[in-house]
């Protein structure tokens, strides 16, 4: 074996391909064939693409399937604390030994192919899922759709969540162009579900052109919130008295409905109402308006684009606090920093901008502080070099009835969760 530890494998993979992101299906397709697999699982596969809501839909799909007693394999990205979070079998993270063995098999099969970090992980997940022989596989698209490594596999149902402006360097600068990239996961004869209330016309056109039966939220299915329950209406059928999801935010009803419709679209796959209700109660998704500490309340959220920031703002309004709101923010340089800060600034009393200089594309502490100062100059600002030091400053300044929100990227949330786990 090339390496004995998971950390060694991951460190090596980061430098194998000189490009951090190298979209295309040729390399992964060749390696998949060499390792002895085709592009079909022996069970249904649901692929999930979109800008925001992908992780939530994947979490709902997994929770409901597990509640129904189905052996389920799930692939998602990125991770927060451990790489193993990306690959789950029956709800449990893959162990280091199994993951390293899969990496070795991919390494032996790749020859001279310069796989990216994401491609290596995707192929390892496919290899592990082939051996597990589950009843259902759920795979989240990493970036875009058409050229993402996950798209080498043939889905049974394709899901597209909300589409917003993000990853413009690779996907385009407008929703129509980005939508067409996401629609690349659609296949002729494969049912699809879209959870965007205002989908780009490019998605609808591509579905028509590809002879795809596309179910649209607000048209083919809709949600009806109530005080303590909600109803999913789908044409002539309804699911009544559904429990509110364990994930916070009314917008999660749309994600839950999208997941339920995807499961209902699987031919020969039965999802009972009891499993749906239990899955809604059981679902967990770290890093999405997650409370990790009390007195003062500390909330982490991976919001890093305008649409996600607007959802974060709605959550801050819905869960107001008696005291002040302190915000720790650190972002990547290729994200819409100004839009995100402006979106939430009305609910922030004190800012603690920090740097992400140790991660790829991370914005420096100085640039992050400058952006906040320009856009929120009327509130208190205390800059910090790292997320950990910003969390420490915010915690020292916060009263028991205050709250601290940490957001801006998966890296930001990961560093904050490590800080509070180690020190508090």
Image: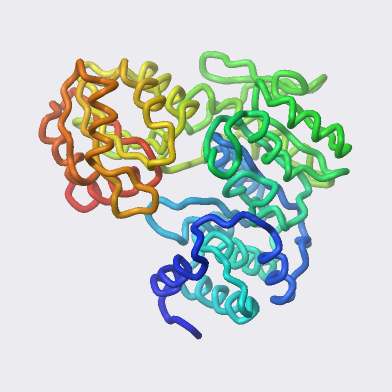
The colour scheme is rainbow
- 328 horizontally vs 304: left or right: left
Q: Could you say which is closer to the camera, residue 343 or residue 19?
A: 19
Residue ID at (50%, 26%): 307
Residue 41 visible in the current orientation: yes
Q: How many marks?
A: 0
Q: Residue furthest bottom?
A: 1
Residue 222 vs 298, above or below: the answer is above
Determine which quarter of the picture holds residue 368.
Answer: top left
Residue drawn at (67%, 36%) of the image: 160
Q: Can you see residue 323?
A: no
Q: Where 319 falls versus 162 (above or below)?
A: above
- Residue 162 in the image, given as x and y percentages of width and height: 60, 30
Q: Residue at x 31, y 39 (%)?
A: 330
Left/right placement of residue 259 relative to residue 84 reads right
Q: Is residue 419 left or right of residue 251?
A: left
**Is the residue 354 above or below the residue 35 in the image?**
above
Q: Position of residue 71 (x, y in %)?
A: 66, 57
Task: State which quadrant residue 31 falls in.
Answer: bottom right
Which residue of the protein is positioned furthest toward the left in this rendering?
396
Give 26 or 399, whichever is nearer the viewer.
26
Residue 356 location (% of width, % of height): 30, 47
In the image, taking residue 303 as reference, residue 296 lies left or right, namely left
Q: Is residue 177 above or below residue 15?
A: above
Q: Position of residue 376 (x, y in %)?
A: 26, 20
């Amino acid at each position: 074996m090339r390496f004995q530890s998971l950390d060694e494998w991951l460190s090596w993979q980061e430098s194998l391909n000189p490009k951090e992101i190298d979209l295309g299906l040729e390399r992964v397709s060749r390696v998949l064939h060499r390792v002895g697999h085709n592009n079909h699982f022996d069970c249904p596969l649901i692929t999930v693409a979109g800008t925001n809501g992908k992780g939530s839909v994947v979490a709902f799909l997994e929770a409901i399937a597990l509640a129904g007693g189905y052996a389920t394999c799930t692939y998602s990205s990125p991770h927060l604390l451990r790489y193993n979070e990306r690959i789950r079998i029956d709800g449990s993270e893959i162990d280091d030994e199994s993951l390293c063995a899969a990496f070795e098999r991919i390494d032996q099969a790749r020859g001279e192919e310069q796989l990216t970090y994401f491609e290596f992980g995707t192929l390892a997940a496919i290899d592990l899922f082939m051996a597990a022989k589950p009843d259902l596989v759920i795979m989240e698209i990493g970036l875009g759709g058409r050229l993402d490594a996950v798209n080498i596999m043939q889905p049974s149902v394709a899901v597209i969540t909300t589409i917003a402006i993000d990853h413009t360097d690779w996907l385009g600068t407008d929703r129509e162009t980005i939508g067409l990239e996401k629609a690349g996961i659609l296949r002729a004869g494969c049912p699809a579900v879209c959870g965007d209330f205002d989908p780009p016309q490019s998605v609808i056109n591509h579905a028509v052109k590809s002879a795809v039966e596309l179910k649209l939220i607000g048209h083919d299915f809709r949600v009806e919130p109530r005080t303590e329950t909600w109803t999913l209406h789908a044409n002539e059928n309804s699911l009544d008295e559904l429990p509110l999801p364990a994930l916070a935010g009314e917008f999660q009803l749309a994600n839950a409905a999208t997941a339920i419709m995807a499961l209902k679209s699987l031919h020969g796959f039965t999802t009972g109402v009891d499993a749906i209700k239990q899955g809604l109660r059981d679902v967990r998704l770290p890093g999405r308006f997650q409370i990790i500490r009390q007195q003062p309340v500390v909330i982490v959220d991976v919001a890093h684009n305008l649409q996600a920031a607007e959802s974060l703002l709605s959550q801050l309004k819905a869960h107001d606090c008696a005291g002040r709101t302190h915000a720790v923010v650190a972002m990547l340089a290729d994200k819409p920093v100004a839009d995100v800060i402006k979106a939430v600034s009305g609910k922030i009393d004190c800012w603690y901008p920090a740097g992400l200089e140790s991660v790829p594309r991370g914005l420096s502490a100085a640039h992050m502080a400058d952006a906040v100062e320009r856009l929120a100059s009327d509130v208190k600002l205390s800059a910090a070099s790292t997320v950990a030091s910003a969390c420490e400053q915010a915690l020292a300044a916060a009263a028991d009835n205050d709250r601290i929100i940490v957001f801006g990227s998966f890296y930001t949330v990961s560093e904050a969760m490590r800080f509070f786990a180690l020190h508090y």
